[in-house]
Image: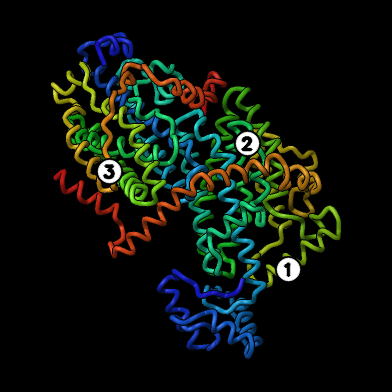
Amino acid sequence: MNARPAVGDRPEQATRDATRAAGTTTAAPPSGQAHSAASAGQGAGQDELLAHFDALIEQGETIEPRDWMPDGYRRMLIRQIAQHAHSEIIGMQPEGAWLTRAPSLHRKSVLIAKVQDEAGHGLYLYSAAETLGVDRADLLDALHLGRQRASATFNHPALTWADTGAIAWLTDGAAVINQAPLCRTSYGPYARAMRRVCQEEAFHVRQGYDLMRALCKGTPEQKAMAQDAVDRWWLPAVALMFGPPDTEAGGSDARTAALGAAVSRRAMAWGIKRHTNDELRQRFVDQCVPQAERLGLTLPDPAIRWNEERGHYDFSPIDWDTYRTALGEDTHWARRRIDHRKAAHDEGAWVREAAAAYAAREEASGAPAGPAADVHRQTQEERV
Amino acid sequence: MTTTSDQRANPAASACPDVDLATHLLRLGDDALVLGQRLCAWITRAPLIEEDLALSNIALDLVGHARALLTRSGRLDGTGRTEDDLAFTRRERDFTNALLTELPNGDFATTIARQLAYTHYACLYYEALAGCPDPELAAFGARAAKEVAFHRLHADRWVRQLGLGTAQSARRMQQGLERVWPYTAELFDEDDVVRRLAATGAVPSPAPLRPAWEREVTKVVTGAGLTVPTPSWTAGGGRSGLHTEEFTDLIGELQSVHRQFPGGTW
């Protein structure tokens, strides 16, 4: 993925870029071609460009779409943002399946709003990825063809109503811990998208906890349903939401940990990541244990206990092989998610074609944008 | 639609204004609930992520309308039933939504055709309701009319895009209109309940709104290069609890979790 002129950039950003370009001569001119600036730089001033980039990271400045950036940085971001966007879109499915069965109208409203937020998060994130020179349609194709993935957490089946609560409390809870530091990630459009995402996710966690609390205060059958959901969603959240171990403490073997650590170090040096996977995982466990106690639910890990010396809860090492096999890309559940997504995409192709044909037709006829607004205005006038 | 149906919906049906109003609001609430339920089934299956977003937004508003209307109906009918009692413990035959709202989603064009018919009707009706003497109901009407105006804009825009998009989309949009049009007349039906309420000025009757609805939808449909269908038959029965066979599945799904946990609190 090479640099491409960023489109749809915000005007205030262009001004800032212009200021920065004037001061340094390394960034693209505001109305010019970022690509040509970058490729020109690759011959002559690669070191200078890199030094400037490193200085920005060092000063805690954000990197913006028109700034020069190393290819590895761009690739890592595209991969991470796309995976995150795909996870939002695929993550709509396990809960979305319960929209028609929510047991109260209040819970139905809350769940519709939550799934709607996830679609919105997917859109912000695809937009953030697009500032790096990729196209949403291509990213979706990559997801459909298995070249890019969503978090395997969402391959886990949502078997009962209580699963919607466990997902919101645990999975979204894990997401918030993972994502809160990304509000300060070095790439500006990603950081800005994450600020909106995190605010909404934190709200989902509270709603999930509230749903679980209602079940725990309900009939014994309701409480049993809640416990069963936690039994099935705890480990996917702990294991898969934070990624593989990247410290010896969290890894099941030193080699995996070393591999994870290398990737994390690179991401941290670039300011994309702020903490290791294992630090965040520990933070999540520390947050959930007292919450589960308040709910009267048991987390399915007999090794969970407070470690006075560390000031953290201990928990069992994660059996990575189990997760890789159970929820890997070729399993029933993984296929089901992708097939569902592909079916929606394929069945909707004629609608997207129609919308594109209509837009082209309007553009050719020079009609002002917003034909629907015209229709609406006319009917309003007629009524008056 | 007859006195018999009113008696079925509420055995104590009489000229009691509260009971009449409860019956009427239950019908409006059931329309919103059932259509909202149908739209929920689109979420994660829409042709564009933007449409997952738009359809969930519309579904959310509809469930909101249903909650307000069912709550008020339960307070007025003397049974003290809550919104959830009414949504989750009534049987199929007790639901009084118009059949249009329960029609299966079909393809995207059929859903849009159903949205076109409903949103233009609901917007006109809620605007009229905003002028009723009951302040709570009038405030609800004003708020709901504003929300449905956005849903109407969404439907209008898609009818136009599909009608003027490709040959396939125009064909599907026309088929969608043909599919739903026989069900549109029921929205404007007037029975004794509505006549009594309208006579006292408590709530407006939908019947006089039909010409305005015809004008509006005709303008949208013809503007999209499509033809307003002239159906050879007219559906009815929803207001008296006579539904389509597909409705049984819709209610079964809606109520499944609630019914599996008797005495549950959510």
Q: Secondary structure at mark 3?
A: helix
Numbered marks: total: 3
Assign a secondary structure to mark 2.
Answer: loop
The residue wearing badge 1 is A265
Residue appearing at x 25%, y 31% in the figure:
B137
Which chain is disc 1 placed on? A
In the picture as drawn, the residue positioned furthest to the bottom comes out as: A44
Residue under label 2:
A158
- Residue at (39%, 48%) from the top-left corner? B167
Q: Amino acid at mark 2?
A: Ala
Q: Residue A84 in the image: state x and y as whole percent.
A: 60, 56
Screen quadrant of the N terminus of chain B: top left
Between the C-alphas of marks 3 and 2, the distance is 41 Å
Do the residues at pointers 1 and 2 share their chain? Answer: yes
Horizontal side, residue A105 vs residue A266: left or right = left
Residue A237, relative to residue B203: is it above or below? below
CA gap, disc 1 to disc 2? 35 Å
Q: State how the image is colored.
A: rainbow
Residue type at mark 1? Answer: Arg
Judging by the rendered image, the residue that carries numbered circle 3 is: B221
Instruction: Give x and y (percent) for residue A60.
Output: 58, 74
- For the residue labelled by badge 1, is the local secondary structure a helix, a strand or a loop? helix
| In front of the other: A186 or B256 | B256
Q: Is residue A182 above or below residue B42?
A: below
Q: Are marks 3 and 1 on the same chain?
A: no
Of circles 3 and 2, the one toward us is 3
